[in-house]
């Protein structure tokens, strides 16, 4: 099995810096290479990149995607939908 490489749209360090810019020092940018080729289990298992705010002292996923840009775009969409519903 070939080792998957992190996405090259931005480095993990750049993604971490962007997460901190958006959500503060508790924010995280996590890269998880796929362990399974059949889609895995659960909603997050499909995505290699997750970005989180760290709100509430835990790891709260704000966005996810196969690239860092997809993950941040997903986070922006989720925040917009949350804003519209309140």
Image (spheres, rainbow, N blue to C red):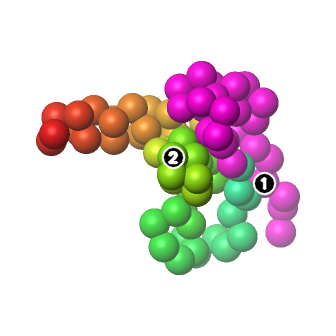
The residue located at (48%, 73%) in the rendering is 42
Residue 22, numbered label: none
Query: Tag 1: Cα neighbours inside 10 Å, few (<14), some, or many (≥20)?
Result: few
Q: Secondary structure at mark 2?
A: helix
Horizontal side of 22 relative to 78 (left or right) equals: right
Image: 76 above or below 60: above
User: Tag 1 or tag 2, which sits nearer the N-term?
Assistant: 1
The residue located at (78%, 54%) in the rendering is 4
Q: Is residue 14 visible to the viewer in this orientation of the structure?
A: yes
Q: Nearer the viewer, mark 2 or mark 1?
A: 2
Horizontal side of 37 relative to 72 (left or right) equals: right
Of residues 66 and 77, which is closer to you in this image?
77
Image: 26 above or below 2: above
Horizontal side of 81 relative to 67 (left or right) equals: left
Q: Is residue 23 magenta?
A: yes
Quarter of the rendering occupied by the N terminus: bottom right
Of residues 26 and 80, which is closer to you in this image?
26
| The magenta segment | 1-30
Q: Can you identify the residue that label 2 sits on?
A: 55
Do tag 2 and tag 1 residues touch (Cβ < 8 Å)? no
**x and y percentages locating residue 72 in the rendered image:** 50, 34
Residue 4, numbered label: 1
Of residues 39 and 65, which is closer to you in this image?
65
**x and y percentages locating residue 49 in the rendered image:** 62, 47
Image: 47 above or below 5: below
Q: Is residue 18 magenta?
A: yes
**x and y percentages locating residue 78 in the rendered image:** 33, 41
Q: Secondary structure at mark 1?
A: loop
The residue located at (69%, 25%) in the rendering is 17
Q: Is residue 15 visible to the viewer in this orientation of the structure?
A: no
């Amino acid at each position: 099995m070939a080792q998957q490489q992190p996405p090259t749209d931005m480095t993990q360090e750049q993604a971490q810096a962007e997460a901190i810019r958006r959500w503060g020092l508790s924010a995280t940018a996590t890269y998880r290479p796929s362990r399974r080729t059949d889609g895995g289990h659960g909603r997050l298992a499909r995505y290699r990149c997750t970005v989180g705010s760290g709100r509430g002292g835990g790891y709260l996923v704000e966005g996810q995607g196969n690239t860092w840009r997809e993950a941040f775009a997903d986070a922006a969409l989720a925040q917009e939908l949350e804003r519209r519903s309140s």
